[in-house]
Image (cartoon, grey):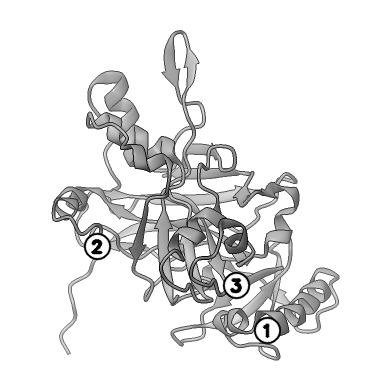
Amino acid sequence: MKLATYRDGSRDGQLVVVSRDLSTAHYATGIAHRLQQVLDDWNFLAPQLEDLYLTLNQGKARHAFPFEPAMCMAPLPRAYQWADGSAYLNHVELVRAARGAGMPAGFFEEPLMYQGASDDLLGPCDPVVVASEDHGIDFEAEIAVITGDVPMGASPEQALESVRLLMLANDVSLRNLVPAELAKGFGFFQSKPATAFSPVAVTPDELGDAWQGGRVHLTLQSTWNGRRIGLCEAGPEMVFHFGQLIAHMARTRNVRAGSIVGSGTVSNQAEEKDGRPHWPKGCSCIAEKRAIETLQDGQATTGYMKFGDSIRIEMKGRDGQSVFGAIDQVIAPLLPAQPG
């Protein structure tokens, strides 16, 4: 099934069920008001939502209405936890190689992960508000999952069973703030503003055989100012699958229902062409494009995002239909606080 959260003036919005083709929706009020309620009581409430989803897809839902992505908050507007991995090691290798750094051995044995802010997650059409263009504004196109409860010490196989929903993410980065923060030895904080998520979150069965081994075997599209910058395959080069990422989180603590786990920037390796590396799939963030330029030409020529720039992130199924709907955002300046 496909679920979304509509704006209603509250912090957590109103849960709606969305049709498979993303054309219609129906409030889930008679079952649950908020997605977190469903995650807390999944075995009881999810089957009821499935029944409504079936009725909606059959065109028999009495109070269906046209689905509007612009009305959506993040599927979970506030989450108990947002932890982002870096499962596509090609991305890490490229960015490090561009600054002359190698890959530490441990990178191939266990995932990289940081814990981001989860108290103010963005909807798919919300602007990315930034105080200054000098911060080095970048998008990062990712896949994310929402978990049920996971006990401490769970195996990757057990952890994978906890995946309740999948969605897309734009894990915005302020690249020019990163070096100083990492130099302090405590990781990202101000360099990682609010993350945006796709209009709908979907259950794994919606992906059919594209959901295999804890990976989504579909293509992630990134379009910057109307120009496609990335068309990356999300499945084959995800070194650590979602079960491994979740198990990494749960190694020393319980993970509670409503935790969001990101894949990291989706990235594909280069192909050899005329004796030189070539990246036909493009990139899912600007930093990776700049790293490729540095490796090929000795310097990066692509700048980061400016106010007024747009970014669209979308994934289509094998039938050509959008699976999650699109993240479609504009970069906007922070306005001065109004008196009073």
Q: Secondary structure at mark 3?
A: strand
Would you name the residue on which mark 3 appears? 4
Q: How far across and down, in percent of the image, does residue 121 sit?
A: 41, 70
**Image height check: is 331 above or below 9?**
above
* Cα–Cα span, label 1 and label 3: 10 Å
In the image, residue 116 lies at what x, y percent?
34, 65
User: From what the image shows, is residue 71 above or below residue 155?
Assistant: below
Amino acid type, label 1: Ala
User: How many C-alpha atoms fall within 10 Å of the one at disc 3: few (<14), some, or many (≥20)?
Assistant: many
**Residue type, label 2:** Phe
Going from N to C along the chain, the mark reached first, 3 or 2, is: 3
The residue singled out by tag 1 in the image is: 28
State how far apart marks 3 and 2 are (Cα).
28 Å
- C-alpha span from label 1 to label 2: 36 Å
Name the residue beneath numbered marker 2: 189
- Residue 31 coordinates in the image, percent (x, y): 69, 88
Q: Earlier in the sequence, mark 1 or mark 2?
A: 1
The N terminus - image quarter: bottom right
- For the point 55% across and 45% down, the residue is 220
Density class for disc 1 (Cα within 10 Å; few <14, some 14-19, many ≥20) is: many
Q: Earlier in the sequence, mark 1 or mark 3?
A: 3
Residue at point 46% right, 42% down?
88
Mark 1 falls on what kind of element? loop
Q: Nearer the viewer, residue 336 or 169?
A: 169
Type of amino acid at the residue the image marks with label 3: Ala
Question: Left or right: where does residue 273 sit relative to residue 95?
Answer: right
The residue at 42%/71% (across/down) is 253
Which type of secondary structure does the marked residue at label 2 adopt? loop
User: What is the x, y in percent for residue 77?
Assistant: 46, 75
Label 2 packing within 10 angstroms: few (<14), some (14-19), many (20+): some
Of 281 and 161, which appears nearest the observer?
A: 161
Query: Which corner quadrant holds the C terminus?
Result: bottom left
